[in-house]
Image (tube, rainbow, N blue to C red):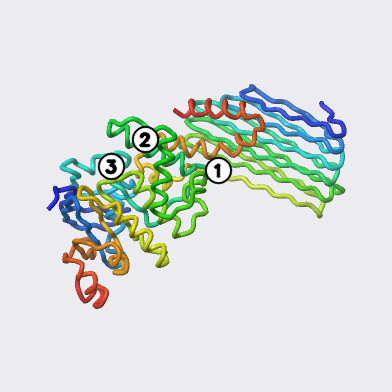
Amino acid sequence: MKVLHKGDIFEQVFINEPGVDLHIVQEAGSRVKIHIINLSSANNNIVIEQAGKGCETEIYALAYLHGEEQVTTETHVKHAVGGGRSNQLIKFVLDDNARGRFVGDLKIVPDAQQTEAHQTNRNLLLSETAEMRTQPQLEIYADDVQATHGASTGQLDESALFYMQQRGISKQKARQLLVNAFMKEVIESIPDTAVREQLLNTIDGVVE
Amino acid sequence: MGKELLVIKNLHASIGGKEILKGVNLVINEGEVHAIMGPNGAGKSTLSAVLTGNPAYEVTAGEVLLRGENLLAMEPEVRARAGVFLSFQYPVEIPGVSMTNFMRTALNEKRAYEGKEALTPKEFLTLMREKKKLLELPDKLNNRSVNEGFSGGEKKKNEIFQMAMLEPCLAILDETDSGLDIDALRIVAEGVNRLKTPQNASIVITHYQRLLDYIVPDYVHVLADGQIVKTGDKTLALELEEKGYEGIA
């Protein structure tokens, strides 16, 4: 367990780790910003507790999987004190027989008024045999809060693919453009430009 | 008369088992503008979908030749590279794919097909700027996602802008006038007219005579119940406007 003291900042990008296991307790005014990028199998478990006022937590996770690869990402975010903010954006892109699983446990205790908490899970299935399981669990016991969550799983937009083909773009390249567009939101939120660029190059390679 | 560009022979096509085109015959030569008019459900949009290879439609009989080659055997992207362009009735929004990236990919795929080298970023941007002026489109367009958040007029201008970039030999304008106010219509029509050369041709699919005041056709065809039932010159469009389709077909 890691304790972030008043005003501490924990910012980290995890790329292709077989598993990220983090347990962080945030004291007042501390900030967490993590990115987890998986291009192969992994198990991630992120536990965050906002124990002091005015904390910020940002969790971004992206998994892009092929073959028999599997990723499970669990997030457990607890607002034990009010006035904090958390934002989670979790995306999976699954091709072939890949499996994805997201468990998103978000808790706001009765006294944690004026909390702002958002959780978004978006998944893209590129094959008939890929599979995604999503289990959002929201426990919100305070009434004066701003909390949103959404989960959706879909396929590539056929009409967009045809539109691009009609302009001379091969179907494969069109797929690549759409997949990259889907992943961009997570990648572009990485603060370090060099890391971002390197990642975009890696992903282009995977798609081609 | 120009050389034969597109030949459609006895074309039959269906969607979901329902036959929409029931034997369309049409010859288009270089340098010509053909208008196709007809009531809703006649098969106008099906014709454009079939010519461009939309996978939702099935061709059940007939053939289509583009400069003597079997168009129907080509993948949609190959048809596009060979010079068939569709200005969509409902252009698709593609969030996250910038106009620049989209257009550069499309143009370079076409150039590769023609055995030409890819444009440098600088050459490409210069070309974008030049062609955008033609449609009075703003510069900020480059960084926006394809059609995302565009107004109806901007979407249609964007179609013609793409046509200007790709310089097709056969442009199919599917209800390009729908949803356009008179100013946008004028800009779009002027764009189309300025792209006209003795070597290319266009098919203008429309419901109304209005567009044909701006893009003057050499031939007007009436499509009804999956067949071309009447062909005439531009005066046929006026006659249709006056008497309605029932009075003609």
**Which residue is located at x 72 percent, y 40 percent?**
A105
| Contact flag, marks 1 and 3 (Cβ < 8 Å) | no
Residue B87: x and y, percent?
Answer: 35, 53
Mark count: 3
Q: Secondary structure at mark 3?
A: helix
Amino acid of disc 1: Thr
Gap in Å between the C-alphas at discs 2 and 1? 33 Å
Determine which of the numbered discs, if any, sits on residue B108 in the image.
2
Residue A86: x and y, percent?
Answer: 75, 42
Question: In which image quadrant can residue A72 be found?
Answer: top right
Q: Secondary structure at mark 2?
A: helix
Amino acid of disc 2: Asn
Q: Chain of mark 2?
A: B
**Which residue is located at x 16 percent, y 53 percent?**
B27
| Disc with the residue nearer the chain's start (3 vs 2) | 3
Q: Which residue lies under the disc numbered 3?
A: B79
Residue situated furthest left in the rendering: B1
Residue B242: x and y, percent?
Answer: 25, 77
Q: Chain of mark 1?
A: A
Task: Identify which residue, A142 or B193, lies in the foreground.
Answer: B193
Gap in Å between the C-alphas at discs 3 and 2? 15 Å
Q: Are marks 1 and 3 on the same chain?
A: no
Q: Chain of mark 3?
A: B
Q: Are marks 3 and 2 on the same chain?
A: yes
Q: Which residue lies under the disc numbered 1?
A: A153
